[in-house]
Image: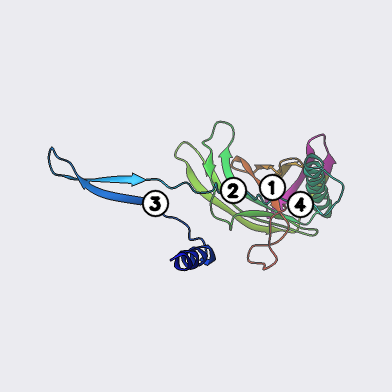
Amino acid sequence: MKRFFAAGTAFLLACPVVAQSPQFSVGTSGADSIPQTTIVPVQQPPVRVVERTTVYEEPERGMDRAQRRAYRAKVYAAKIDSLVQSRNYMFFPNSMQEIPGGMIRSIYADYFFFGMFVDHVEVHLPTERGVTQYVEMLNFDSMSIRDYRAARTQWGWSVTFNIADGDALYHADFAVSTVTGETVLTLLTPAVTMRYVGWLWNKRVNDPRYHRMD
């Protein structure tokens, strides 16, 4: 008998430990004979949760996060400086307003633009005139660029020049922020003065290399 008991004990010790699952028993209540379920909780070891966060890492070593953010701002400002000085960029508006006192309208179509190039200007912009908010289109190219001036300011760049489309004369005034990238174009036309807010891009629409300056 002792041999059987020892063999049984050895068998139990040799078996792997199986994780326990919650146990429950079903009984009846004497009052209404409704089956009652009693859950016996089984304690489990605590689960360790590891949180992983992916952050932007600059290739520059030895910088902390604040220094990397400041470095990115300097790189962005340098890109804007280079773009304006190249005199080869595209302005895309996301809002327009007749001034003074006109309604601000959003622009969602990406085919409206003002292109400044070394030897010519391309213009395709909507305009708004009068209380009826009648929308017209400016759509022309001009090889006549006069009085071009680009001046560095405390907040970015101020670029002004005159262009002609036949007998019609236009005056353009760009205010470009090197901090936020916001670009404001004030365009004086023979019929109306418009204010556009948008940003500068360095490629043409539908160019496979086309991307924003960020």
Of callouts 4 and 1, the N-terminal one: 4
CA gap, disc 2 to disc 3? 21 Å
- For this view, does 175 lie left or right of residue 13? right
Q: Which residues are magenta?
A: 150-168
Disc number lying in front (2 or 1): 2
**Residue indicated by mark 2:** 48
Of pointers 2 and 3, the one earlier in the residue sequence: 3
Badge nearest the viewer, 4 or 1? 4
The amino acid marked with disc number 4 is Glu
Secondary structure that dominates the magenta span: strand
Specify the farthest residue to the left.
32
Q: Secondary structure at mark 3?
A: loop
Query: Residue 112 appears in which quarter of the rendering?
Result: bottom right
Mark-to-mark CA distance, 2 and 4: 27 Å
Disc 3 marks a residue whose amino acid type is Pro
Mark 3 residue crowding within 10 angstroms, few (<14) / some (14–19) / many (20+): few
Tag 4 secondary structure: loop
Q: Residue 212: give x, y in percent of width and height.
A: 69, 55
Q: Is residue 22 above or below residue 12?
A: above
What's the CA distance linking mark 4 and mark 3?
A: 46 Å
Q: Amino acid at mark 2?
A: Arg
**Residue tagged 3:** 22
Tag 2 and tag 1, C-beta contact below 8 Å: no
The quadrant where residue 97 appears: top right
Q: Quadrant of the N terminus?
A: bottom left
Query: Which residue sits furthest front?
Result: 1
Residue toward you, 106 or 42: 42
Residue 167 is situated, as x and y percent measured from the top left of the image, at: 68, 52
